[in-house]
Amino acid sequence: MSGTGIGRKLGLKTLLFPIFVILAIIVGLVLGAKFKAENTGVATFGIPIGLFFMIYPAMTKVRLGDIGKSVKDLKTIGMMVFLNYAVAPFLVAGLAYLFFNTIFLHMGLLPPSVISQVIVGIILLGIAPCIAMVMVWTDLAHGNLPLGVSFVAWNSIIQVITTPFLVYVLARTSVVISPLLILESVLLYLVSPLLAGIATRGVLHRRRYFSRVLNTLGSVQTAALLFTIIVIFWSEGSGITRSPILIVLVGIVMLTFYFVLFHIGYFTAKRLGNNYADSTSIGFTVSARDFEVSIAIAIAAFSAYPFVAVTTAIGPLLEIPLMLSLVWLQLRRETFLNVNKSSNIANGVK
């Protein structure tokens, strides 16, 4: 009975969404096989447009006053910073060495020279926290959006300083991170959607039909997410046909990384007294990664080692399905918590 109740509360759209994601991946792969993405410019323009319309609907729900309060929550921000910069990079490096140097090497799935490059690529994928799509995952899972915005603002500053140091420590290579690269991402994927969302809310929030506008924007967000999946798999999906075993092996490591780190963040926050929405924001902020920075470092610092760049290019292919699985898990968790809360209230339990 409880499973049926949870299914009803999740809604048909949420239950069917994984099917739409799978269909979007298939469409992207088919398009990639028939049309070369670099010849169409689809990735250059499609991904920024898709990301904007994924993030903008979420920003219409954000109030500036709530962001101001979140920025001042130094205890929560301090926990996020510790998990993002003292735990996440070392966890992903440890998992990469454990799986590839210990398990996959002995299975003979890849040559040792390729394995060493893949390990570096995975380390790069775990170095920098996400400053764009994390807002989408937070919104879809009903997390605290103002808190998420404040996390992104802090991370956009901190990672400029910490990323070169972490790359040197974990990959033994000196790199320079251009602040312009981070600034471009912040302006495109945080500031512009936030300003558009605030403007939309300011104009429409007193109107009777504002709730209908939010519902429409929710559908826009879903369509933009599916569009972005198609574009990413169209532009990068050829790697699946060239080296499918590499996709699977990197996917095992990254799935473990996302799942473990998300729950470290979520349950640590819950342990410290945070509610579901705050804990969910923390979980996604410390697990989602900035694959744009990873790819840029791979190209600039590891151009002589092709599988480093290939591994970082696999990042966006894996991150969307894996993070959506966490969104799905959180929605079920939220519904379960609400069902239990309603049951306790009905039974007179505080």
Image (cartoon, helix red, strand yellow):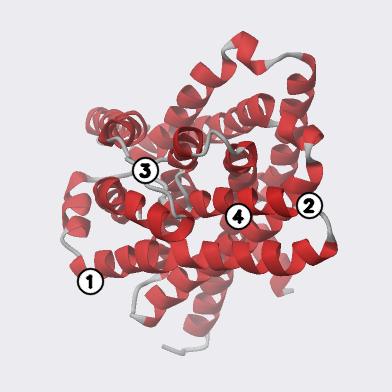
Task: Say if mark 1 contacts mark 2, CB within 8 Å.
Answer: no
Mark 4, secondary structure of its residue: helix
Q: Position of residue 308 (x, y in %)?
A: 59, 42
Residue sticking out furthest to the top: 39
Question: Residue 289, can we see it?
Answer: yes
Is 172 or 285 nearer to us in this picture? 172
Q: Which residue is mark 3?
A: 175
Looking at the image, is 2 positioned above or below residue 255? below
Mark 3, secondary structure of its residue: loop
Residue drawn 47% across the image and 66% down it: 90
Q: Position of residue 195 (x, y in %)?
A: 25, 31
Gap in angstroms between the C-alphas marked 1 and 4:
34 Å
Residue drawn 47% across the image and 22% down it: 49
Which residue type carries mark 1? Answer: Lys
Residue sticking out furthest to the right: 108
Is 308 or 187 nearer to us in this picture? 308
Q: Which of the marked residues, 3 or 4, is nearer the chain's N terminus?
A: 4
* Left or right relative to 61: residue 308: right
Q: Residues within 10 Å of mark 1 (few under 14, many from 20)?
A: few
Q: Which of the marked residues, 1 or 4, is nearer the chain's N terminus?
A: 1
* Left or right relative to 249: residue 207: left
Q: Which residue is mark 4?
A: 119
